[in-house]
Amino acid sequence: MGGIALTIASGSIMTEKLAYVQDKINSIQLDIINLEDNKKNLDNDSKQTDKQIANIKLELKNLKPKAIKNQATLEPIYKNLYVDKEYREYMAFIYEHEEKIDPSYKKLRELDQKIVSEEVSSRKAILSGKIIGAKIKHLGTEYNLLVFTLVIGSVLMTIGLVMVKLGAKYWYDLVQKPTDEKIRLELEILKKSQSYSDASS
């Protein structure tokens, strides 16, 4: 009986463990769904950001002065700045007030800043997407391990219950039944002995 009680207790503990594993599996499934949804949104945000950057760069290209293209174009300006103080002051004045003189300069600066901001956002979205991808992979591995544990645990529990049932049957056939038969025979002998004793007296 002690073995049966121990097996029942072990089965109860195993049932609780399997229930915990099943709850954990359900929780991981929900986490994976949420993470995949977040990753999808981040991927979409990244694509939108890339499109915005491309549009801004195109707008920048159209706005930039056509005259200032390369070092060869700038070289005469640098020479004049070096030798002519009045020209330097003139250029400094233009640079200081260029946004008032030509509003496109203000737009250029705004677009430059916007590109930097969008590129930072894009890098953050890509990094977050990679982190989420790693989390999904980790959760997937944990999920598979838990499912394997659940299957193996269920199989072992089933085997244990079958063994308990067979063990109880064998115990009854090999121990309890012969004992009961022995007791029954002893009682019959005792009854016959008492009957014989009563008849003699």
Image (cartoon, grey):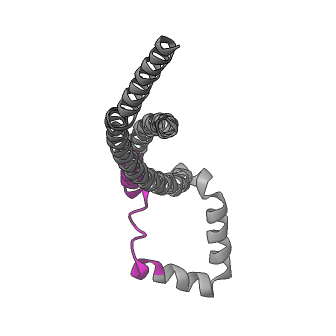
Q: Position of residue 146 (x, y in %)?
A: 40, 46
Residue at 49%, 35% in the rendered image? 1
- The residue that appears at 67% across and 65% down in the rendered structure is 93
Q: Is residue 9 visible?
A: yes
Percent position of residue 2, x then y: 52, 38
- Quadrant of res 61: bottom left
Looking at the image, residue 164 lies above or below residue 88: above
Q: Residue at x 52, y 36 (%)?
A: 9
Confirm whether residue 51 shows in the render: no
- Give the x, y percent position of residue 76: 48, 82
Please say if 122 is above or below 170: below
From the viewer's perspective, tell me whether residue 27 is left or right of residue 54.
Answer: right
For residue 70: magenta?
A: yes
**What secondary structure is the magenta-colored segment mainly?**
helix
| Left or right relative to 15: residue 165 | left
**Magenta residues?**
48-74
| Rendered view: 94 above or below 35 | below
Q: How many marks?
A: 0
Residue 125 on the magenta segment:
no
Residue 188 or residue 1, whichever sits in front: 188
Q: Residue at x 42, y 50 (%)?
A: 142
Name the one closer to the observer, 184 or 71.
184
The residue nearer to you, when weighing 21 against 5, is 5
Position of residue 77 measured from the top left corner of the image (x, y, whole percent): 51, 79
Q: Which of 153 and 37 lies nearest the eye of the viewer?
A: 153
